[in-house]
Image (spheres, helix red, strand yellow):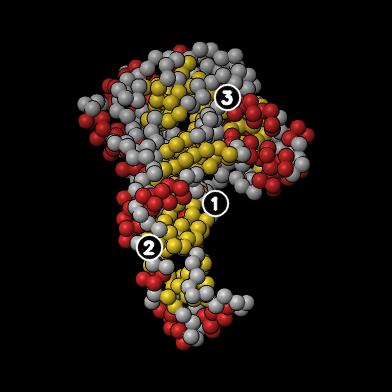
Amino acid sequence: MKVEQISIFIENKSGRLAEITRILGEGGINIRALSLADTSDFGILRLIVNDVDTANKVLKEKGFTVNKTEVVAVEVPDRPGGLGAILKALDAEQINVEYMYAFVERCGGNAVIIFRFDDADKAINALKANNFSVLAGERLYSM
Amino acid sequence: MYFNEEFETLPRPALEALQLKRLQAVVEKVCADVPFYTESFLQAGLKPGDVRSLDDLQRLPFTTKQDMRDSYPYGLFAAPLEEIVRIHASSGTTGKPTVVGYTRKDIDTWSDLMARSFVAAGAHRGDIIHNAYGYGLFTGGLGAHYGAELLGASVIPISGGNTKRQIMIMQDFGSTVLTCTPSYSLFMAEEARAEGVDFKKLKLRVGIFGAEPWSEAMRGEIEEKLNLAAIDIYGLSEIMGPGVAIECIEAKKGLHIWEDHFIPEIIDPETGRRLPQGERGELVITTITKQGIPLIRYRTRDITSITYEPCACGRTHARISRMSGRCDDMLIIRGVNVFPSQIESILVGIEGVEPHYLLIVDRRDNLDTLEVQVEVDEQLFSDEIKILQLLSKRIEKEIKDVLGVTCTAKLVEPRTIQRSEGKAKRVIDNRKL
């Protein structure tokens, strides 16, 4: 039930982000969701793409440092308190959220949030036990 | 004004006669008591008796920093440890420092030369000497201290750091002479301004600055900002420490090297041949009175030139020009010797770090800064910011722990650090010296 995400190390220099998107575009890769974490010296670009392996390959060929990480995509009811209910369930199990960001597309009227947990398996079990919908990678990549 | 008028103004024929006598004695001594020299003279096909004139010095083999490392820690000592009363050390490429030992007489000589240096710089009995050189294994603090006491000045052994307190003490104690690295003096000036302290209202009259390269332009800046006469001092622990050579305040044109204790030569660092007066080359020094660790033709790797022209101050000792650089890769950062290879070995010791790095040295707010750029490859990379930040913190801490130098570690993209064939370019020094 986990989703593959690619992370790219970016130095804080102008044009790096443009370069990455250009490489992905030329590789026929469609970006489904993204998040950019930054410090004063460097940033980490995290992407959900339609083709993880090709994206990984074309970026590495251009000399970027790329990692594949497993994240969890969760459907969040689009109403006040929707996200709060999910976080409450995770907190009850003492599961930490390392970071999270929102998916662009909706899934049948619900929002989709990408989570990176300290313990993904435990998180998935907790979410399922509380009747939250965890999305499979295949479904997400093709949304 | 002189501290030791007889020796400082000794006519050159008498000075040279004294040098020859002392040179012959030290050669005799090291050949007998230091196996390294017994061997190197043997290999050069020389006997101690072959030194019949000062010109014969050119025939003797060199001693290098590497020889000192190979003899770590006490291999080059010519006196038994029972006679050694002080040990100092400076950093070396392998993480092992270069060790020097002083007999009681060596300490007396050093104090005398440092006292001479203070007087040449315009200091005298009654001065309050604010000694902000570091005290410890580094020779700066204690070297200046003993000279100041011998001179009869009042010495404040404040050592480096805690700039606010330094400024308070200068103000309250009425310091008249400042000794520290030139970059630290400018940092003090900045701090003083921030604290609302006007250097022009302080009693400082003379600053004696050394332990790192600096320029005439920087002298102008220091003299203007600190309102004192800035004097260049030269020394290195292998030879003695601070006080090997100093500018006189009368001329401020070249540093008098105390020739009754050291014989300077300028050589071409490539061929090893002696260069004529006025030409730039590597400074080579033979110590002719040292007992603890006398060195024959020690290659300082400092680039300078020498003149024997008479000086306005009346001292007869030759003058070397301001150091214009070093002929190897050693960096001096805030007075601390740093070799790129030391940083390399620290980086390599950190799991996952590749030895592709670049050191960027700069001077900001008048203090030397060191940035260590490290490439982030897949082994190191984490998609969590905090893990990468921990990595840079760890690099900074290890470098600080081992070398005593504060740096900032900067993570950069792989293959962005320029590779070169042969000797890698590890250092970009942006300091305008």
In the depicted structure, whether residue A133 falls above or below residue B83: below
Q: Do labels 3 and 1 share a chain?
A: no
Mark 2 vs mark 1: in front: 2
**Which label is found at residue B216?**
3
Residue pushed farthest bottom? Answer: A129
Which amino acid is tagged 3? Glu
Of the pair A69 and B195, the residue shown nearer to us = A69
- Of residues B112 and B429, the one nearer the viewer is B429
Q: Indicate the chain on which mark 1 is placed.
A: A
Three-letter amino acid code of the residue under disc 2: Asn
Give the amino acid type for the residue marked by disc 1 in the picture: Ser
Give the residue number, with chain letter if any, for mark 2: A50
> Is B93 placed above or below B38 here?
below
Q: Give the quarter of the image for residue B325.
A: top left
Mark 2 to mark 3 CA distance (whole Å): 62 Å
- Residue tagged by mark 1? A40
